[in-house]
Image (spheres, rainbow, N blue to C red):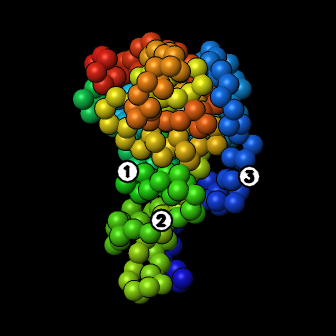
């Protein structure tokens, strides 16, 4: 398969399926109680230099409480997937240019900083304009495709999107020749985050989760991540999960920690629960 063009952006994570599987094999499939505090979850599962992905979309169903704890624990040199990240990204930017080091070091940018309804964050702008954060450009769709590829266990997915655009030229994707038709395609590399954090409506102690409303890319993010913290509005019993298994969006074997955090998305929106403030 010939590469016709390569984007100039830096690839911050390894798209290798083989390398990712080595990490996934270490995850237990046992149904164990994973309930812990937010502080313990962040302390145990996030290390300096890790790559972080966040669930939700913009200001909707975002894991605000966990993000505050990440800033509180002052993790350093993190990578970040900016897949329509607005309020959550602004929280993370509090970890830069504050005299306490550099929290954000690498960002895959699809849509960050923008929160037009409330005004752009001066701190987020300062951080991204400072030159201390590396970034590579993507669209929302291509970043979602990266999670989809990882969830499928393949190193890339082919697509037509971004052909002939500046986004393609500033991304880490590659323009390739289809081995079947000879037509040009964009090869979008898989993205395996070291840690993902997703806020859900309900979870049992094992990590079987329910999401009400649109899940965005979260189902793929959960399967792509090497480790996963779930915060939930409320804990429910496993019997409740078993009573209607079709409502389970994220299965327990993807999850490493469950944190019960009522109003955990505040001041963001939580569909069917509360509106953004």
* Image point (58%, 63%), residue name: 155
On screen, residue 48 versus residue 154, left or right, reads: right
Q: Could you tell me which residue is drawn at 44 percent across and 85 percent down?
A: 180
Task: Identify whether 131 is placed above or below 18.
Answer: above
Q: Measured from the top left, where is residue 176 in percent x and y? A: 47, 78
Q: Identify the mark nearer the N-term, 3 or 2.
A: 3
Q: Nearer the viewer, mark 1 or mark 3?
A: 3
Q: Secondary structure at mark 2?
A: strand
Q: Mark on residue 22?
A: 3
Picture coordinates of residue 52, whole percent (x, y): 57, 39
The residue under label 1 is 140
Residue in view at x 62 percent, y 18 percent: 35
As measured in the structure, the alpha-carbon distance from the residue carrying label 3 to the one carrying label 2 is 21 Å
In the rendered view of the protein, which quadrant contains the N terminus?
Answer: bottom right
Query: Is residue 175 rendered to the left or right of residue 104?
Result: left
Ranked by sequence position, the earlier of labels 1 and 2 is 1
User: Are there few (<14), some (14-19), or many (20+) residues within 10 Å of tag 2?
Assistant: some
Q: The residue tagged with tag 1: helix, strand or loop?
A: helix
Please name the residue that numbered disc 2 is placed on.
157
């Amino acid at each position: 398969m010939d590469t016709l063009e390569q984007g100039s952006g830096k690839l911050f994570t390894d798209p290798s399926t083989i390398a990712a599987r080595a990490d996934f094999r270490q995850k237990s499939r046992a149904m164990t109680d994973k309930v812990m505090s937010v502080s313990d979850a962040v302390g145990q599962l996030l290390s300096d230099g890790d790559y972080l992905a966040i669930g939700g979309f913009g200001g909707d169903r975002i894991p605000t409480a966990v993000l505050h704890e990440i800033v509180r624990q002052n993790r350093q040199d993190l990578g970040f997937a900016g897949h329509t990240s607005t309020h959550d990204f602004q929280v993370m930017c509090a970890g830069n240019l504050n005299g306490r080091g550099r929290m954000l070091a690498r960002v895959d940018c699809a849509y960050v900083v923008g929160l037009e309804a409330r005004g752009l964050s001066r701190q987020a702008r300062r951080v991204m304009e400072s030159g201390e954060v590396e970034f590579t450009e993507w669209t929302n769709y291509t970043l979602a495709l990266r999670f989809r590829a990882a969830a499928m266990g393949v190193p890339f997915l082919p697509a037509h999107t971004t052909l002939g655009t500046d986004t393609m030229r500033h991304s880490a994707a590659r323009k390739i020749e289809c081995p079947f038709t000879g037509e040009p395609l964009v090869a979008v590399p898989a993205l395996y985050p070291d840690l993902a954090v997703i806020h859900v409506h309900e979870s049992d102690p094992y990590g079987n989760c329910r999401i009400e409303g649109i899940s965005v890319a979260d189902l793929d993010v959960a399967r792509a991540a090497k480790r996963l913290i779930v915060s939930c509005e409320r804990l429910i019993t496993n019997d409740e999960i078993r009573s209607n298994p079709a409502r389970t969006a994220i299965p327990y074997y993807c999850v490493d920690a469950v944190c019960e955090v009522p109003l955990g998305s505040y001041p963001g929106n939580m569909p069917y629960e509360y509106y953004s403030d």
